[in-house]
Amino acid sequence: MTPVKLHPKKALLAFVLLALMLAGGLLCFRGVELYRDVFQSSLVQKRVLPPLRAVCSAVERALQMRGDPAERAARLYRDLPIPDSLQRPLGSSADKSRLFLLCLDGASWIDVDTFGPLPNFERLRREGVWTRHDSTLLPISSCAWNAIDTGYLPEQTGVLGFQRPAAGWPPRWETISARDFAAKTLAQRLDEKGEITFTVNLLNSYPEQVKRGVLIGGWWTDPKGVFTTPPELSEALRRRGYTPLLDWQPRLRLLGLLWALWIGVTLVLLRLGWKKRRSEALVAIAVLAFLSLLFSMAYWKSNRELRSPAYRLETLLENQFYPSEQIVLRMFEQPGWRFGAVHLHEIDTLNHHRYREEETRRGCYQETDRFLGALLDRADERTLVAVVSDHGGAYYPKVFDLPAWLYAEGYLSDDPAASRAIALHEASANVGAIRLKEPSLAEEIKERLESLTDPLTGTTIVKRVVLRSELHPGPAKEQMPDLVVETDPEYMVQAYERGYWQKKFRRFKSPPVDDPLYAAQTPYGPPIKVHQDWYVGGHHAREGLFALWGPPLGKLGEVEKIPIEDIAPTLMMALDVPFPEDLPGQPHSDWFVQEFAAAHPVQKIQDPVRPAPPPVTTEVSPETLQTLEALDYLK
Ligand SMILES: [Zn+2]
Ligand SMILES: [Zn+2]
């Protein structure tokens, strides 16, 4: 076959066509919004997409040539250089107890029971002490983990969310990083005592907080910069593909293959078949383009739910869970540390995006159980293992839209500066917050909220309203919301700005109820919205879990529910860390066997929490903001 020589004009034509095709391909990725009406119709959602997704999943799985992701992580991290500080045997504290804290974002005992049998969670409960806690004022990761790490409540630290409202009216938002936190963490207190700690991926742990031990930063970390102590560890981790950001990016292998095939076939047809068989060539190009478009739809994220087949549990685990597990197991085996911790965000990510896909969530709990088992098996007689979550997860069939209600009631108007009340960002749960221009309005709004009943069910919507005056005293109390609203677990509280409703309203259906709660016309939609049946996403629930395991624990099994602020002092007591008198919680010495409790007296010091410094907003990378927005945490 003699090669066909391209005429300059034809080459130009081919080039223009190729450019058009690439632009078309890009449009299909970015412009599928145009197909939203078709895409989100229930026929497409229920009948067309599921089989397409099944095909995509099967092909994606087949294309995943690199083998089992857990085994690959084990291979990759086997020779991770371990910093000297962890390898040095402990001197004077060699016989002291040490503690490892497994932080499971969004985990609950309800899920552990639902997805059981989980043998290692069972072992933990059988041989240790376990309980529940009621998270922080707003059950959102940022402030709940801060309370667990430091022992202080939001009204003392000012950490209420991933952003905080600045002073003035209307409130402005400031994004915070670890530099803004006024209180010391348990790891920092140990570090100051000269003890060695290692923490992996803890929320709010960047910039660096320890000098001696090992710290691998969590969110807010610049993945391209230094995110570890010691600094050289960053490069070693990056080389293995580790990212400190929450990453559930799909691997668009099948799509890439289809579009590449389309471009390839088009090019070949242009060169060989164009002259003689123009119509056949056009048909082939069009058919392939249609297929690529159809599969692009199957991959498209609808309504910020990650419903594409590429957003699989395996991808989620592959990106951060397995690497974190390998890093932790390597460090856990070293002799030199007294406190270690890892934060795993996968359970919460699935709660947000796949709550009603039980099999996916079960898979994540099973992997977590396996990891927990590896830790329990490696623990020696002086090692305590603790498991904690910041809050649980739940599905909310309805949404109570706080700005819509405030608008319908005349408190919020089109001009924020002229409004009398503004809903603060939500906790992604059945809890919301309100800031008032005039604090004297608080009682009136509380009364009106508490009297709300759902015309469809006749039940009370709001369970309780907490006023700022009822909060614990602390230097950040004045920055706290005037009212915190907790609804019945049927309703998630939403507090998004204008435009969110218009963008997301297909997620909701409108029952034909002639009541202002369901029918009021506001720029935020009606105050009560009902999720469509196909919506699988869930959110946070207030109740979190806590368990302690190891020889010093009396095998008490389940104990009475504790406030979240008791967790830090209990861990501090077990690790002989003196703690400030103004910590609001109490250590639970009674959970430990008598000799241990006697040898670890509670030591209190004078070191009151300081007011938080002004936030360092420039530290937050665009990727982090994107992640937080994708999780519905940011406005
Ligand atoms: Zn969380
Ligand atoms: Zn969450």
Image (cartoon, rainbow, N blue to C red):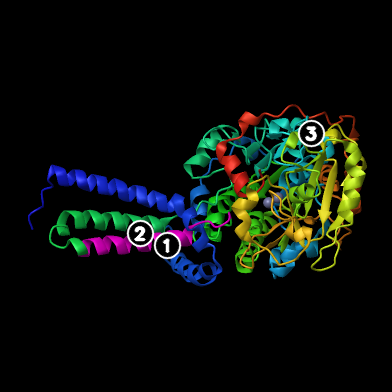
Q: Quadrant of residue 214?
A: top right
Q: How would you rate the neighbour count of disc 3 (Cα within 10 Å): few for under 14, some for 14-19, many for 20 or more?
A: many
Q: How would you rate the neighbour count of disc 1 (Cα within 10 Å): few for under 14, some for 14-19, many for 20 or more?
A: some
Q: Quadrant of residue 268?
A: bottom left
Residue 419 inside the magenta-drawn segment: no
Return the mark for residue 295.
1
Residue receiving disc 3: 183
From the viewer's side, name the closer residue of 253 and 6.
6
Residue 237 % position (x, y): 52, 41
Q: How would you rate the neighbour count of disc 2 (Cα within 10 Å): few for under 14, some for 14-19, many for 20 or more?
A: some
Secondary element under disc 3, as helix, strand or loop, is: loop
Disc 1 C-beta below 8 A from ligand 2: no
From the viewer's side, name the closer residue of 484 and 220.
484
> In the picture provided, is 630 more to the left or to the right than 439?
left
Q: Is residue 62 visible?
A: yes
Q: Residue at the left extreme?
A: 2
Comparing marks 3 and 2, which lies closer to the viewer? 2
What type of secondary structure mainly makes up the magenta span? helix
Q: Which residues are magenta?
A: 280-304
Residue 170 % position (x, y): 75, 34
State which quarter of the image contains the N terminus: bottom left
Above or below residue 181? Residue 374 is below
Mark 2 near mark 1, Cβ–Cβ under 8 Å? Answer: yes
From the viewer's side, name the closer residue of 587 and 106.
106
Residue receiving disc 2: 258
Above or below residue 399? Residue 26 is above
Residue sitting at 61 percent across and 45 percent down? 629
Find the distance from the CA under tag 2 to the CA under tag 1.
9 Å
